[in-house]
Image (cartoon, rainbow, N blue to C red):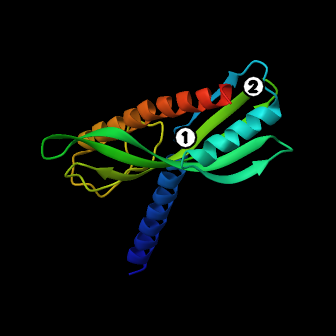
Amino acid sequence: MKSFCLFLLALIFAGKSFGQSDILNAHRDSVVSYADSVSVNGATKEDLFIRARDWLACNGKTLKMEDRESWKIIGTASMDGPVTVHYLGTQTGIASFDFVIIIQVKDGQYSYTITNIDNTRVNGTNFNGTFGFLYKSTHCSAKGFILSQAKIDLAYQSLKDGFDKSEKELVAFLGSSMKNP
């Protein structure tokens, strides 16, 4: 009986250690983010700050914070991107994403960071699921799908490619708004 109790305790301890290790490994994989600095000749930081704030307000983004001391604006936004899912055949649909955008300005330059990209919906396919936050890993850690891991990983990569395409359009639109008052 004593041996059995010791064995049971060892099993519980090993399981607890394994679970903590999985959690630590999941956080090592960093989130997908996009960042760049862009020069805008002749624009003051005040001009760029107003243009960035107006761009957020006029394009369905939500202004969360603006700070004129650090010349930083933080907003949240939603955007759609194409996705291909291999579930009951190959299906192309639209994935919806929520994300955070940070814009910081100084004289003649602005920088942006798009981060915390969260897949909230996949529409137009027989696949009913979401992948959650996008990470740099090629392996999708989301659980609960009926698909094989290889098909999940393929859909996950397609999802990231879809956001990447839409992000390029968003950044181009931001750039034209920042350069042309």
Residue marked by disc 1: 30
Q: Is residue 34 above or below residue 63?
A: above
> What residue sits 49% from the left and 65% below the top?
13
Q: How many marks?
A: 2
- Three-letter amino acid code of the residue under disc 2: Gln
Residue marked by disc 2: 109
Viewer-nearest residue: 50 or 110: 50
Q: Is residue 72 left or right of residue 124?
A: right
Residue lying at the far top of the rendered structure: 41
> What residue sits 46% from the left and 72% below the top?
9
Q: Position of residue 16 (x, y in %)?
A: 48, 64
Viewer-nearest residue: 39 or 177: 177
**Viewport quadrant of the N terminus:** bottom left
Q: Is residue 140 above or below residue 17?
A: above
Q: Position of residue 48 (x, y in %)?
A: 74, 33
Q: Position of residue 153 (x, y in %)?
A: 31, 40
Residue lying at the far right of the rendered structure: 69
From the image, state whether disc 1 or disc 2 is nearer to you: 2
> What residue sits 35% from the left and 46% below the top?
95
Q: Quadrant of residue 138?
A: top left
Viewer-nearest residue: 35 or 38: 38
**Viewport quadrant of the C terminus:** top right
Compare marks 1 and 2 and give the one earlier in the sequence.
1
